[in-house]
Amino acid sequence: MTNIKVIIPAYNEADSIAHVIKDIPKIVNEVIVVSNNSNDDTEINAKNAGATVLIENNRGYGYACLKGMDYISKQDIKPNIIVFLDGDYSDYPEELTKIVAPIINDNIDFVIGSRVKELREKGSMTVPQIFGNWLATTLMSIIFRAKFTDLGPFRAIKYDKLLDLKMGDKTYGWTVEMQLKALRKKFSYTEVPVNYRNRIGVSKVSGTVKGAIFAGVKILGWIFKYSFKK
């Protein structure tokens, strides 16, 4: 029987987190919301919606994801699949079944939910986000012959493969680190087109100039780091 756990990093997502949790398919064994130093009702709303709630006071997307992984590592029964999903309701959690299907049916190691243009709601991705995705995936294609088209946060990976990656980025480089390390490890991977809508609330990354620049620097830094790594 497939054991699936979902990790949701969340910083001040009180208005959206219950919607996200409610729409996650019942095939999931546990939903883990990691409150990343939230100062609103994110934690209580997530708990009331049925999620396991953890608190990570160190601010950063990677910090939150690592907190969730640490929690899972201490459980007696380990999952087969880990799904990462944002807490802002921009993704469609019900599409989780599409994300995990290649792993369950075809034994693929790693799956990205690709936010293709024809399935994106107008305005759901900013110009810096679209350009950053294009630049990062184009560089990965040129340097590593990768076939990624997106750095989408909605993704699934076999638990043992996730551990093998030895993830370490604490902030905005988490998604691209995972993809680069999966390429290095020669994991099998695929993308699944997913719908994408305008998030509830304001983005903490793409919604600010500082956040967008910092994320871009981190992503490009990981790519160039791995392009020179033997």
Image (cartoon, rainbow, N blue to C red):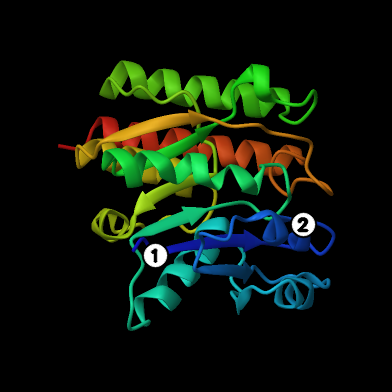
Kind of residue at badge 2:
His
Q: Is residue 92 above or below residue 9?
A: above
Whether residue 65 is situated above or below residue 185 in the rendered picture: below
Q: Residue at x 25, y 36 (%)?
A: 188
Amino acid type for the residue under numbered disc 1: Asn
Task: Identify the residue at horizontal 42%, vertical 58% (top origin).
Answer: 82
Residue 129 picture location, percent across and down: 64, 29
Q: Residue at x 33, y 83 (%)?
A: 76
Vertical placement of residue 113 versus 20, above or below: above
Residue located at (50% from left, 39% from top): 98
On the image, the x and y values in percent for residue 77 come to 33, 78
Q: In the visual, does 37 lie left or right of 30?
A: right
What element does badge 1 sit on? loop
Residue on which disc 1 sits: 3
Tell me, for residue 19, which label it has, or none.
2
Mark 2, residues whose alpha carbon is within 10 Å: few (<14), some, or many (≥20)? Answer: some
The quarter of the picture where the N terminus appears is bottom left
Say which quadrant the C terminus sits in.
top left
